[in-house]
Amino acid sequence: MFLRDSFAERARRTARAAAFMCVLSLCVAAAAAEPPNARRVIAGARLTEAPTIDGDISDAVWAEASVGETFVDQITGLPVADQTTFRLGYDKDAIYVAAHCFDARPDEIVMRETKRDGRVRDDDHFEVNLDPFHTHSFGDFFLFAVNPLGTRYTEVAAARAGKEEWKGEWEAAARVVDDGWTVEMAIPWSILTVPQGDEAVTIGFNAHRG
């Protein structure tokens, strides 16, 4: 299975907005180092067990996951001061993501929204963008965002937009820690309607922090 970058989210909060653009392969090794604002290849990882989604990223299973780091400013292309690292894995049921959003001023983290699908992206947030059929078309993208309170926000492919019952159930949890905040996500394959089977598929992937 291959995940390939296809989305660059507009910066909402210029001071912290950053993105990690990559080409993720779930079956090949990582490529050589490239400039931080280039597409990067990281090795995918099938997890031996599903992580507990509680915002605590110290679960031993995350050591099996791939690592993404060096988020860059979407305007300048330069690495941002408050960095983010994430781990990415999968199993037959879901894609799993854990992120550590470092913040030099954790007392200034913005986290107000408690309503699901409310104004989560006006808060500090971490989001994953997926293009399940790798069409590079905005109408086919899925977006999953979480703020430091663990409040979830979802945007589904355009053909399913407006259908609340079609957004599907996915898990997320977050915690504020001494040097920022952490988040875990579990996104079921069933939400993405990716065909089941033994053949590899290619989908778009990007991670963004706002």
Image: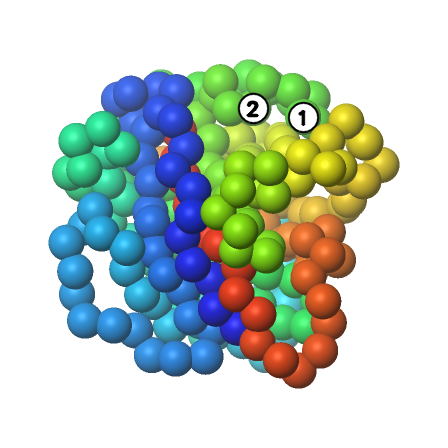
| Residue under the point 33% across and 40% down | 19
Judge left or right: residue 43 versus residue 95: left
Q: Secondary structure at mark 1?
A: loop
Point 64% across, 67% down: residue: 50
Tell me the crowding category of disc 2: few under 14, some 14 to 19, or many 20 or more residues within 10 angstroms, Cα based: many
**Residue nearer the viewer, 185 or 56:** 185
Cα distance between the residues tagged 1 and 2: 7 Å
Q: Position of residue 99 (x, y in %)?
A: 43, 49
Label 1 with label 2: CB-CB less than 8 Å: yes
Residue occupying the point 58% across, 18% down:
119
Where, by quadrant of the figure, is residue 143 drawn? Answer: top right
Crowding at label 1, few (<14), some or many (≥20) Cα neighbours within 10 Å?
some
Q: Nearer the viewer, residue 136 or 69?
A: 136
- Is the residue 170 above or below the residue 42 in the image? above
Q: Is residue 158 above or below residue 23?
A: above
**Quarter of image, res 39:** bottom left
Q: In the shown orientation, is residue 13 left or right of residue 141?
A: left
Percent of width and height locating residue 97: 51, 55
Q: Secondary structure at mark 2?
A: helix
Q: The residue under label 1 is which amino acid type?
A: Asp
**Residue that mark 1 sits on:** 117
Question: Residue 53 location in percent, x, y?
Answer: 62, 53
Position above or below: 131 against 49: above
Q: Amino acid at mark 2?
A: Val
Question: Any mark on residue 120, and which?
Answer: 2
Image position, residue 127 (x, y; %): 49, 39
Vertical comparison of 90 with 74: above or below: below
